[in-house]
DNA sequence: AATCAACGTTTGTGATCACAAAAATTGGTT
DNA sequence: AACCAATTTTTGTGATCACAAACGTTGATT
């Protein structure tokens, strides 16, 4: 069910490509990014790359430094806490709103995604785990049918993605306990409060886990 | 204390110019925007305008339509409620955080801005009122020292600005009761809860007032 | 008079060029 | 060998060109 790549502007497909690289941790914080380099690696001219980069700067996924060079922002302890704070305010709320529009079909899809994610986790497929985790959360958030909140949360994930990958690749994913099943169980019971709490617990646990291994901050 | 416009890139000054036009309601919802037209009116080439427009699209201040044309988004009842919801979640929180870093100097500045805003309001200077209101709120929000939340709220104001202007120009500002003085009073008493409540009341009142006159939605 | 096809115009998109600032490299001096 | 100045290369920025899609207009047909 991926949207087709044909009849897309080069600009849009460039954006999606770069966005995914950032979101799933293919680009490490601090490493500088050059427009011509990106253009060559994506086989397009610098023009759409420039617009894509501007867009991602606006979404805080990239940072325009004083030297006018572009890089994935470094994570700091302060910024980490700010993102954690914002996520905890917005994401459980989105989950609450999603509850109203949930269907059995969607619940089954979520369980399916979660299984896939678990398998990736067990087999050490970090990129697969991150992608599955993203799909799980955003399938829920999209059900909230609230574009304004969704775009805010989207920006937060773009800011957090690179760092998440960096941490996992340092300390492994073995300590991750899956909170998603608790969430889907609550959905099956139409337990709104339990569901919201499960999402909150999932964030708390993930962020605490990462924050505790703060060797990088 | 405005940052100097010299030694800024054309890109950045173009962004700031267009951003202010949107934020303070110089551009009405629905009216299409052409790149060449903007470029001519700002006396620059289309190139920096394109990047600026992309940036503002990412911030949801502009909308890229299916016909590939760019416009200020129309407000809908649904989107209005979503923005209201998001603002009420984030802005009182920012105000709470700001409380910690408040100083007597800042309180006096806020009172000063509020006076200026009141005068604009009484003399029917709509642009002046909107600018003053913005300065008042964002002086507080910046004190929270939380870039992540600040950029989220910034996006919300960019989305709401054009519509606010549109409403005020239809129904006037006479019904506006100033809640800012309550806020500064609470600050002077270092009353954290009172201050947060005042900001929340200010939003509630403003949004309800505008939402009630929903002839445009 | 209404409808629609054909035309010319406007607009967004992508690529390229020219330039200046920044970074990297080179070569000379202590 | 270490340091610094001069040169070369790389990179971001802004302007311009070429092209195709969307838009508006005109004019003919029913």
Image: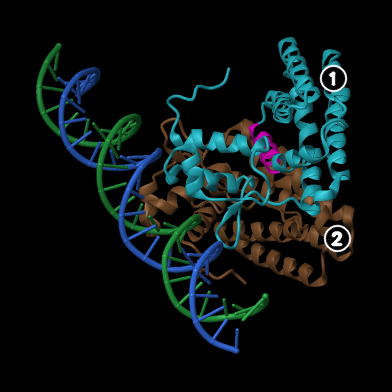
Chain colours: A brown, B cyan, C green, D blue
Q: Could you tell me if residue B92 is visible in this image? A: yes
Local crowd size for mark 2, using a 10 Å CA cut-off: few (<14), some (14–19), many (≥20): few
What type of secondary structure mainly makes up the magenta span? helix
Picture layout, residue A88 above or below residue B193? below
Picture layout, residue B70 above or below residue B109? below
Q: Could you tell me if residue A56 is visible in this image? A: no
Chain of residue at mark 1: B
User: Total of numbered circles in the picture?
Assistant: 2
> Percent from the top left, x then y, of residue C19?
27, 36
Asked if both marks, 2 and 1, belong to the same chain, the answer given is: no
Q: Identify the mark at residue B38; answer none if there is no mark.
A: none
Chain of residue at mark 2: A
Picture layout, residue A131 above or below residue B3? below
Report the magenta residues as a range: B147-159
Left or right, A164 with respect to A63, comes to right
> Percent from the top left, x then y, of residue A152?
68, 46
Q: As rendered, which of A144 and B82 lies closer to the eye?
A: B82
> Percent from the top left, x then y, of residue B209?
87, 39
Q: Which residue is mark 1?
A: B181
Q: Which type of secondary structure does the marked residue at label 1 adopt?
A: helix
Examine the structure image and report whether residue A194 is included in the region drawn in magenta. no
Q: As rendered, which of A3 and A131 lies closer to the eye?
A: A3
What residue do we see at 40% from left, 51% from top? A47
Give the quadrant of the N terminus of chain A: bottom right
Give the quadrant of the C terminus of chain A: top right
Left or right, B188 with respect to C24, comes to right
Q: Which type of secondary structure does the marked residue at label 2 adopt?
A: helix
What residue do we see at 54% from left, 46% from top? B53
What residue do we see at 64% from left, 42% from top? B27
Q: Identify the mark at residue A100; answer none if there is no mark.
A: 2
């Amino acid at each position: 069910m991926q949207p087709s790549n044909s009849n897309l502007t080069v600009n849009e497909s460039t954006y999606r490509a770069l966005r995914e690289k950032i979101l799933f941790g293919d680009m490490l914080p601090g490493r500088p990014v050059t427009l011509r380099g990106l253009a060559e690696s994506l086989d397009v001219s610098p023009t759409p790359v420039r617009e894509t980069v501007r867009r991602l700067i606006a979404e805080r996924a990239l940072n325009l430094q004083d030297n006018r060079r572009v890089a994935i922002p470094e994570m700091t302890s302060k910024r980490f806490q700010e993102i954690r704070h914002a996520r905890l305010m917005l994401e459980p709320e989105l989950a609450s709103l999603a509850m109203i529009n949930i269907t059995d079909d969607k619940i089954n899809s979520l369980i399916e995604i979660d299984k896939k994610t678990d398998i990736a986790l067990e087999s050490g497929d970090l990129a697969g785990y991150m992608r599955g985790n993203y799909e799980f959360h955003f399938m829920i958030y999209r059900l909230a049918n609230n574009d304004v909140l969704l775009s805010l949360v989207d920006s937060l994930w773009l800011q957090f993605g690179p760092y998440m990958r960096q941490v996992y690749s340092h300390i492994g994913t073995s300590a991750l306990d899956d909170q998603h099943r608790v969430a889907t169980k609550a959905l099956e019971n139409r337990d709104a409060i339990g569901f919201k709490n499960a999402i909150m617990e999932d964030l708390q646990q993930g962020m605490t886990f990462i924050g505790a291994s703060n060797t990088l901050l």
